[in-house]
Amino acid sequence: IERGAYIEALNIFNMTPLHFACEEGHQEVAELLICAVEKTGSIRLTKFINMRDLSNQTALHYASMSGKDGITSLLLKNHAECLFSNSSRQLTPLHLACAAGNEQTVRVLLHAEPNLINIRNENLETPLHISAALNRFEITKYLLEQQNIEIDCRDKDTETPLHIATSRDHINIVELLISKDASITLLNANDYTPLHIAAVYNSLRCASFFLSLTQSENMQKTWDFHENRPIHLAVMYNNFEMVQLLIKNDAPLESKNDSGLTPLLMAASHGYIDIMKALINLCPRLALDEDDSNNTALHLAAEYGFFRAIPILVNSGTFVDRRNSFQFTALDIACSHGHIKAVAALIDAEATINSQDTSKNPIPLFIASQNGHGEVISLLLARGADANKVDLAGRNCLEVSIDENRKDAVTAILNSSQWEKALRHVSYYNGFNSTPLRRLIDIMPDSAKIVFDKCITTNLYPKNHPKHQIFCNYEYLEDMYTPWGGSLKSLPERKESSKSSSN
């Protein structure tokens, strides 16, 4: 300084030497800098002290983070600005002091400017939000002692300090806020009460405290934007211990959200086995719950492929062939989604594979064929599905697969032990009687090669052996002359061309 150093010089971040001195907590250096600039005039000193860097922070911001309350007092004595317009949504030194856990600095700042207490940053957070979020107990306690504190102030997500502290399971802060009459019924942007938040974040200590309050019964019944009770959210996030705690305190286990899901139905749709077992063991009849579309937990487990849930639900009394409002069984749904392990589990649970001939509902084999799930088709055919079954249009499973252009499904059927049974069928197609092979040649000629290859066989002798023989089966090519293809003999007459007619 004595050699003429430029005290107000800026680095690439627009930081002055005073910024650095305050950041590092060097009070003597800060005093030297202030004294040197003061000699040039008080106006210039005030401007120097309140200069902002590129992050819009003054020397007081850095001093508040350093924890050196002596520097903070020095800056305030020399007219450092600490109160900004509430409409500017700026980060104040008090926010930073709370974040850093500098209790004495907090006291110094509030003594100098009490109105700092409710100033909001760009996220609409007050210093109380910050201290509650970071579990600064002594600072939070001091802030709550201020007469003009807004204890239920909301941030941009409409969350109060109580919401924030609950999400982090800061039980000491939560108890302190409640003792100062913080509201336990205010909702955030998701319509969550503090108990909802505890359920989401598995804040067990806070949840236990809330449930010990006299209003706990109403808290358990309060729903969010989607009509989820806290028990729904605990299940949704697979917080098993939270589920147990809420159950112990009389959670409404039969309540439905706006999707018609009870806690058990939600557990089944997510495959949360431990939660399912806990709910069913407590109340076996919950296994019979249905959503608004009459889906049982078994339907939902099948839809999402959670095969381990299937034997639990069936053994708990769920009817394996129960149909929902769309007339689908759990096996139908598993087949439509191609969940082969769920299909296997349902078959093991004795789900009906072949419906009665009078049923108007598509059988699982047709559903799998229509959706092209080859592995499921192979399993169904191996476990007793009948390739001779036909739908309301008179088509068998192979013809359904062909019409839907499902290559994997066609391949699975033709490679099964029932491939010949599937080919020996006559149905109506394009205005006249047809066979699966004719359909195949017309729609999927590449897949027709599978049939041709299977119709050509050889004996056990190698190709170069004199007794080597090739056998050709013409049954499916000369289908008009087979016992099952009699109706094919009446083929539609070809229309004569106009040229031949004129002749």
Image (cartoon, helix red, strand yellow):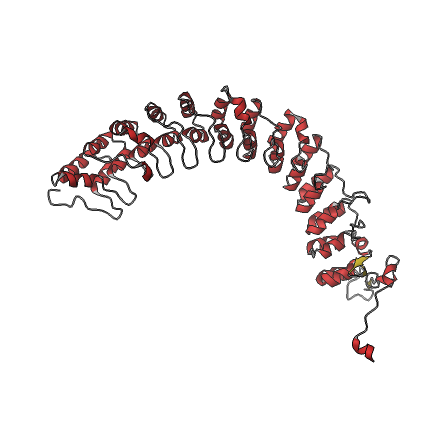
Residue 68: percent from left, percent from top:
25, 31
Name above or below for residue 175 compared with residue 5: above
Q: Is residue 261 left or right of residue 153?
A: right
Name above or below for residue 290 compared with residue 456: above
440 or 45, which lies in front?
Answer: 45
Quarter occupied by the N terminus? top left
Q: Is residue 404 left or right of residue 161?
A: right
Name above or below for residue 169 compared with residue 123: above
Residue 449 seen in the figure: no
113 or 52, which lies in front?
Answer: 113
Q: Toward which corner of the image does residue 279 lie, by quadrant?
A: top right
Quarter occupied by the C terminus? bottom right
Residue 207: percent from left, percent from top:
49, 25
Residue 133 seen in the figure: yes
Residue 311: percent from left, percent from top:
69, 34
Q: Which residue does the image show at 45% across and 31% down from the upper left?
A: 167
Q: Which residue does the image show at 79% across and 65% down from the upper left?
A: 465
Q: Which residue does the image show at 34% across and 33% down from the upper left?
A: 99
Q: How many marks?
A: 0
Q: Is residue 12 left or right of residue 503?
A: left
Residue 361: percent from left, percent from top:
76, 44
